[in-house]
Image (tube, helix red, strand yellow):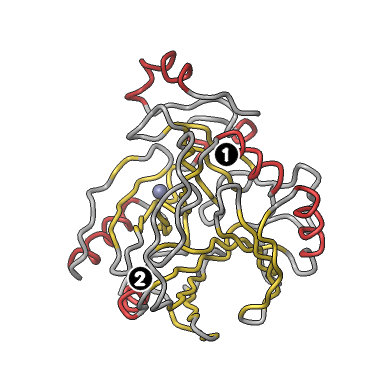
């Protein structure tokens, strides 16, 4: 069994409009944009990262905004809900804020004893704010959102699956433990995690497969501390029969990817070197940063990108 995974590192989704996406995550949700760069494979498309002050693993929501991308169709074989941690008693604040800003799909519920507020992002992305009593992670405070109510990072995510058995086995192998079930949802928690330590598996045997598009999660990344640990995790996965990519340099972390039996793309990402690798913490996310191989094309790339607000 793998012992070095610490919870989530980041979740990467797709969007149809960079400006709208930036506004939603920085203004409406009050996260900090910690990096403005481009897609490694398609440098005419932004890669935007939002999180806490430093982009601490377990807080980082990232987006590829493909201009005018068709909306995705929710279904099974995907991450159906990304869950953020907020302090107890904060949901009335969020409910009022969402109403004032016209956020869609807002609905209160209680899952595993926690009060939540579900909502959708600008492209129909499935989200929930989850009241969490014992989350000691510091908040990024800005845009009229005080520390008493601000998002602390992810609590976790819910996977929508036809059948959960193979994914349960994989999560156990990755170090997660099954804790409880609520209807068709089973919860897994990683002991000693970084706060973003829960995965809920929803069994939906009669739901059609998702079609990826704007508002869909592209992949979900789990955190390991170092490149050395990552190589150990890669070997363990490959020895178990998973087809894992070679290690890829993503500038702010090192990544390996593999497709899971339920259809979801997993990444294992390192906590090193972090988002302050090429910008001071005080100015994270302000300048357009390019992977080094694109630096000589900066003028063309900048011309092809729609400017987004600071
Ligand atoms: Zn990733």
Q: Quadrant of the C terminus?
A: top right
On residue 221, the disc is: none
Q: Residue at x 70, y 52 (%)?
A: 103
Q: Residue at x 43, y 77 (%)?
A: 204
Of helix, strand and loop, which one carries label 2? loop
Residue 282 vs residue 161: left or right?
right
Of helix, strand and loop, which one carries label 1? strand
Q: Residue at x 51, y 65 (%)?
A: 157
What residue sits right under mark 2 in the picture?
174
x, y (%) of residue 292? 36, 25
x, y (%) of residue 237? 24, 65
Q: Earlier in the sequence, mark 2 or mark 1?
A: 1
The answer to which of 39 and 173 lies nearer the viewer is: 39
Whether the residue under disc 1 has CB within 8 Å of ligand 1: no
Q: State the image quarter where residue 242 is shown.
A: bottom left
Seen in the picture, residue 157 relative to 168 is either above or below; the reply is: above
x, y (%) of residue 154? 57, 60
């Amino acid at each position: 069994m793998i012992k070095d995974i610490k919870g989530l590192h980041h979740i990467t989704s797709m969007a149809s409009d960079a400006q709208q996406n930036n506004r939603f995550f920085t203004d409406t949700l009050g996260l900090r944009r910690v990096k403005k760069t481009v897609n490694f494979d398609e440098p005419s498309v932004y890669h935007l990262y939002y999180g806490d002050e430093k982009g601490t693993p377990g807080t980082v929501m990232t987006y590829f905004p493909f201009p005018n991308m068709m909306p995705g169709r929710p279904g099974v074989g995907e991450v159906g809900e990304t869950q953020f941690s907020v302090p107890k008693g904060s949901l009335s604040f969020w409910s009022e804020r969402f109403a004032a800003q016209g956020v869609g799909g807002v609905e209160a519920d209680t899952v595993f004893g926690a009060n939540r507020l579900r909502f959708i992002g600008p492209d129909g992305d499935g989200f929930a704010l989850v009241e969490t009593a014992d989350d000691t992670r510091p908040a990024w405070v800005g845009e009229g959102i005080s520390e008493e109510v601000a998002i602390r990072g992810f609590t976790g995510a819910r996977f929508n699956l036809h059948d959960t058995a193979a994914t349960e086995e994989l999560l156990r192998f990755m170090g997660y433990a099954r804790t409880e079930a609520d209807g068709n949802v089973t919860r897994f928690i990683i002991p000693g995690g970084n706060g973003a330590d829960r995965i809920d598996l929803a069994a939906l045997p009669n739901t059609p497969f998702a079609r990826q598009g704007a508002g869909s999660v592209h992949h979900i990344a789990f955190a390991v501390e170092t490149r050395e640990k990552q190589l150990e995790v890669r070997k363990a996965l490959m020895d178990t029969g998973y087809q894992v990519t070679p290690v890829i340099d993503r500038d702010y972390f090192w990544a390996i990817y593999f497709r899971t039996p339920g259809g979801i793309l997993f990444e294992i990402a390192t906590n090193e070197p972090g988002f302050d690798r090429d910008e001071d913490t005080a100015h994270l996310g302000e300048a357009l940063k390019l992977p080094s191989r694109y630096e000589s094309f900066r003028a063309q790339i900048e011309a092809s990108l729609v400017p987004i607000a600071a």
